[in-house]
Amino acid sequence: MPETSFQGQVVDTEPASDVFLVIGIPGSGKSSVSAGLARRFPLGAHIEGDHLQDLLVSGGRSPSPEEDVEADRQLLLRARNASVLARSFHAAGVIPVVDDVVVRRAHLDFYREQLRDLPLRLIVLAPSADVVSRRVAERDKVLADDWSFLDDALRKEIAGEGEWFDSSELTLEETVDAVLANRPGS
């Protein structure tokens, strides 16, 4: 078997054209749309916030309706880690598509600071609350709590930010098409 050397191999190339941050409440379609979007590019990566949270195999705390300083710290840690991956993929010419539950202005501002100087496109998925409830009931992933109250927080705190998509009446492919149709230069 021939010997292969990685010495001198360049990882970073021409930076990617876009960095996507897809946000919304649980059940809004973030993971499905993000994976579908990433697949549309010659080099695309889907960075899922929930999977980064799952890397904590001991002491992990998920956000809850009650105040939990440690859970909030871990939420920002996952945002930072998603941003580090996004920066790395972007530098290597891979379009990163990050998805995460972001409904608070402070959380969005944290992401923006972590991704500053990158060509960030903020995509807000905002289907109707009844559609989200139906989707949550139909999925394999079981949510510990009813997070529907987050829809109000999203619509109040993130209003006017990014590109909003009501995917209530759209299929997955139609939603991805709509996001791409809004892409500069398309």
Image (cartoon, helix red, strand yellow):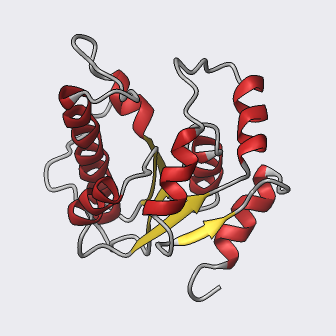
Seen in the image, is 23 located left or right of residue 55? right
Q: Which residue is located at x 77 percent, y 41 percent?
A: 130
In the image, residue 131 lies at what x, y percent? Answer: 78, 43
Q: Nearer the viewer, residue 111 or 160?
A: 160
Residue at image location 21% in from the left, 39% down from the top: 77
Where does the image place residue 72, in percent across and percent down from the top left? Answer: 25, 35
Q: Residue at x 65, y 50 (%)?
A: 36
Asked whether 117 or 74 is in front, the reply is 74
- Which image quarter is the N terminus in? top left
**Picture quadrant where residue 21 is located:** bottom left
Position above or below: 49 against 172 = above
The C terminus lies in quadrant = bottom right
Residue at the spot 22% in from the left edge and 60% down from the top edge: 114
From the viewer's perspective, tell me whether residue 182 is left or right of residue 105.
right
Q: Position of residue 83 (x, y in %)?
A: 28, 53
Vertical position of residue 109 compared to residue 121: above or below: above
